[in-house]
Amino acid sequence: MPTETLQIPTPDGRADAFAAFPDDGERHPGVLLYADAFGTRPELEGKARELAEHGYYVLLPHLYHRHGPAPVIELPAYIGKENRPEVIGRLMPFIEAHTTERILRDADAYLRFLTTRPEVDPGPVAVIGYCMGAALAMRTAAAHPDQVAAVAGFHPSPLVTAAPDSPHHLFPRITARVHLGLAEGDMTPETLGALHEALDAAGVAHTTEIYPGTVHGFTMSDTHAFNSSGSRRHWDRLLALLAGTPT
């Protein structure tokens, strides 16, 4: 399975990135993969490799590239209940600095880079995000409706908030098919209702599912939140979504 470490030109300098793709010399559908708050690490690179084994070119950019190459802090091999607050605390300055303006500048650069790779099929791509990456995926799809045909978000950070730039305000711009896989407790019933209402009102083709017995972060095997059945369900839903993405 070929992999590459790449440098993506952005308006704010070069973003380091990881890519994985099939070893057959052919062109394949492109996937932009946004990490969770912990960022690029072997866990996410493994997800990129897994997707590549199913026939996709997967680009995993370093979200915090303005602050140095990945990882911006030394991450423990396993993020448990005990050390998670300390790790998040050290990452919080980078998370807070990743403003909507920066997200959109990066999204433009990432898509331009991905869609011009010689290994990537022409046509629309898919965007996947975990945790805060799910909101980034929705923003990317809204900003580039002609380039994004499918979006998947798993254990997403808030998508419906009181902020003027809350992701749910962008739903009318999204033309992609969307799947959201939620952990139990990711959203209150009221917030989940508001999410469905916003997606339906915008005419977004979507499925939203609460994965039983899961907590936030259930897809990440390097954290205490990992849930094997939830992870398997996430792969089933993700691959089914991607299989319907036009190329």
Image (cartoon, grey):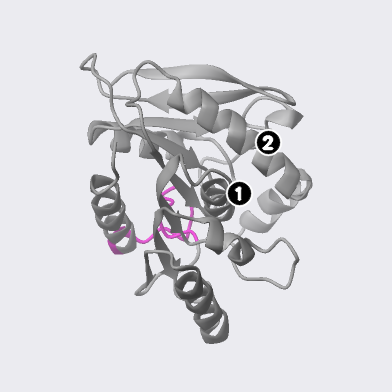
- Count the marks: 2
Determine crowd level at label 2: few under 14, some 14-19, many 20+ residues with C-alpha closer than 10 A: some
Q: Amino acid at mark 2?
A: Arg
Q: Residue at x 50, y 82 (%)?
A: 193
Q: Amino acid at mark 1?
A: Ala
Nearest to viewer (mark 1 / mark 2): 2
> For this rendering, which residue is in front, 199 or 43?
199
Q: CA distance from mark 1 to mark 2?
A: 19 Å
- Picture quarter with the C terminus: top left
Q: Is residue 111 above or below residue 149?
A: above
Q: Is residue 93 left or right of residue 223?
A: right
Q: Is residue 95 visible?
A: no
Q: Residue at x 37, y 40 (%)?
A: 47
Report which residue position mark 2 lands on.
Answer: 105
In reply to whether residue 227 is colored magenta, the answer given is yes
Q: Residue at x 68, y 30 (%)?
A: 65
- Quarter location, residue 148: top left
Q: Is residue 14 visible?
A: yes
- Picture quarter with the N terminus: top left
Q: Is residue 222 above or below residue 160?
A: above
- Quarter location, residue 55: top left
Q: Which mark is first along the chain, 2 or 1?
A: 1
> For this rendering, which residue is in front, 237 or 228?
237
Report which residue position mark 1 lands on.
Answer: 37
> For this rendering, which residue is in front, 148 or 131?
148
- Quarter location, residue 132: bottom right
Determine crowd level at label 1: few under 14, some 14-19, many 20+ residues with C-alpha closer than 10 A: some
Q: Position of residue 64 (x, y in %)?
A: 68, 36
- Residue segment shown in magenta: 217-229
Q: Position of residue 21 (x, y in %)?
A: 32, 25
Q: Position of residue 108 (x, y in %)?
A: 60, 34
In reply to whether residue 39 is colored magenta, the answer given is no
